[in-house]
Amino acid sequence: MALPLDDQDGRRRCRDCGECKPLEDFCASSKRPTGRGSYCKPCHNKRTTESKQRLYGGDREYHLRRRYGVGEKEFQELLAEQGGVCAICRRPDPEHLDHDHRTGWVRGILCFNCNGGLGQFKDDLDNLAGAITYLRGTTWQRVLIHPGVFQMCSPTRGRPPSPHF
């Protein structure tokens, strides 16, 4: 099967801007024999932005609806219920909607650091409890073991300070 004229020599004409560009400048598409879409990347991005604006009122509303099933209105209501602060550290102006990765249910609104921290622990309660135990029991201190000689030790970890000579 011969390719259309605009697909020969690895080039295609964009349906929006009309420019003839290399195929690499077009988005991937499994629906075309060349594996590339009908619009160059800048035109594709412009069309996507316009669609999100027209259908959802913007990128944020689209993201919240697609990913979490809530909109900006629900986000603002939840934030007001939390007093306008992060649900964990209580700092003002959190921006990240937190959800349970198993169920997909929204839990609350967190700041960047708290949301990232939960993500690093993969929502695992045992890991979080271990981190709390670690923080409570691991305070390294300088202990004088001989005149002018110090050793770092912890009351719950590592070895005890050497006996005095």
Image: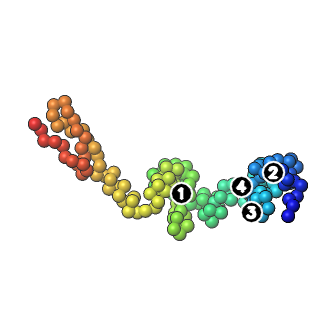
| CB atoms of marks 1 and 2 within 8 Å | no
x and y percentages locating residue 56 in the rendered image:
72, 60
99 sits left or right of 135 in the view: right
- Which residue appears at 75% of the width and 50% of the height? 24
Decide: few, some or many residues near mark 3? Use Cα within 10 Å; few <14, some 14-19, many ≥20: few
Residue ID for mark 3: 30
**117 displayed left or right of 35:** left
Work out how far the residue at label 3 is from the one at label 2, CA to CA, in angstroms. Answer: 17 Å
| Amino acid identity at mark 1 | Ile
Name the mark on residue 58: 4
Q: Residues within 10 Å of mark 4 (few under 14, many from 20)?
A: some
Please name whichever residue, 36 or 107, is drawn nearer the observer in this view of the structure: 36
Q: Nearer the viewer, mark 3 or mark 2?
A: 2
Q: Amino acid at mark 4?
A: Gly
Disc 2 element: helix
According to the image, label 1 marks what residue?
109
Specify the label residue 10 is tagged with. Answer: 2
Tell me where residue 145 sits by quadrant.
Answer: top left
Give the residue type that dot 2 points to. Answer: Gly
CA distance separating discs 3 and 1: 38 Å
Q: Would you say residue 97 is visible in this rendering?
A: yes
Q: Are marks 4 and 3 in contact (CB under 8 Å)?
A: no
Quadrant into which the C terminus falls: top left
